[in-house]
Amino acid sequence: MSIKIEKLNHIYNPGSPFQTNALENIDLEVKTGEFIGLIGHTGSGKSTLVQHLNGLLKPTSGKIWIQGEEITKPGIKMKQIRKKVGLVFQYPEHQLFEETVYSDIAFGPSNLGLSDNEIASRVKEAMNLVKLPYDELKDRSPFDLSGGQRRRVAIAGVLAMKPEILILDEPTASLDPRGRDEILEQIQRFHQEFGLTIILVSHSMEDIGRLVNRIVVMDGGKIALTGIPGEVFSRSEELVNMGLGVPQITTLMKRLNGEGYQLPEDLFTVRDAKKTILEWLRGNNHA
């Protein structure tokens, strides 16, 4: 088991007029190698939850285990935990601060006490993984890069730590369609090729449905639903009541079925829907 969360609660500004119960009795297990999609409307607790997983936030109460080690017990060395759990924030400028791309990506490995040769090797490898040309960009300021490139530098800085668990909080926010697709393809490749345990926080139902093994839906600081994409998106009325939607393709399938078609409703991509509809039409034309 990669992650186990038990009765996790987090209260912001306790005892003040601004007290907010951000997380309430969260119980969740994430298996090694799982690809989890974490969804919920703004303020549902998604970012608060993932920031507990590498110790950026401390729980008000409850326990968390990472790879079998309880990280909420007194005296735990979070530096060791952060080697295992890499977190990429929604906005890369929150993570980029060095003068050059090389220095930014090397910052984490340098803090591990690695040799210069090992650090250089990790920087090159991480830049290659996110498809950033090493010789061309290593000496550039990260703030001179495009939004998509900055996002990849931020991800490379986390990958250079060689984490076992990768958490990405809205990694495609504000990117154009091409940059968004490139980032998502790379995340999918990390999972497939390296077997990383991944938690992807996203507002895009289409991306979540297409990529992940399991969806966790948060609402009001609680886990409202969990299951494989088809199971979760079949409960469209509940999702809408939580301020969420379902993939447009799922909605299309439901509407077509309402017109008398007999089509599966657990589809999330245009390609799969097109193939399914064409097969249905051919089969019925031959009938």
Image (spheres, rainbow, N blue to C red):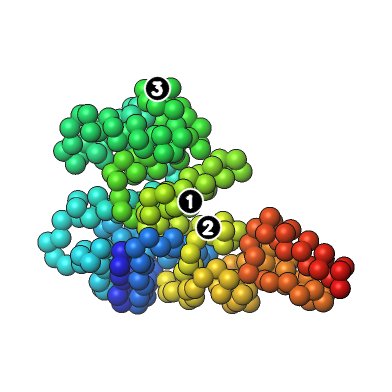
Which residue type carries mark 1?
Gln
- Residue 19 appearing in the image: no
Which image quadrant is residue 271 in? bottom right
How crowded is the residue under tag 1: few (<14 C-alpha within 10 Å), some, or many (20+)? Answer: some
**Image x and y of residue 138, in percent:** 37, 25
Q: Which residue is mark 1?
A: 188
C-alpha separation, residue under disc 2 versus residue under disc 1: 7 Å
Which residue type carries mark 3?
Asp
The residue at the far front in this view is 286
Q: Which residue is mark 3?
A: 135
Secondary structure beneath dot 2 equals: helix
Q: Which residue is mark 2?
A: 211
Label 3 vs 1, first from the N-terminus: 3
Secondary structure beneath dot 3 equals: helix
3 and 1 marks in contact (CB < 8 Å): no
**Residue occupying the point 67% across, 59% down:** 272
For the C terminus, give its image quadrant.
Answer: bottom right
Label 2 vs 1, first from the N-terminus: 1
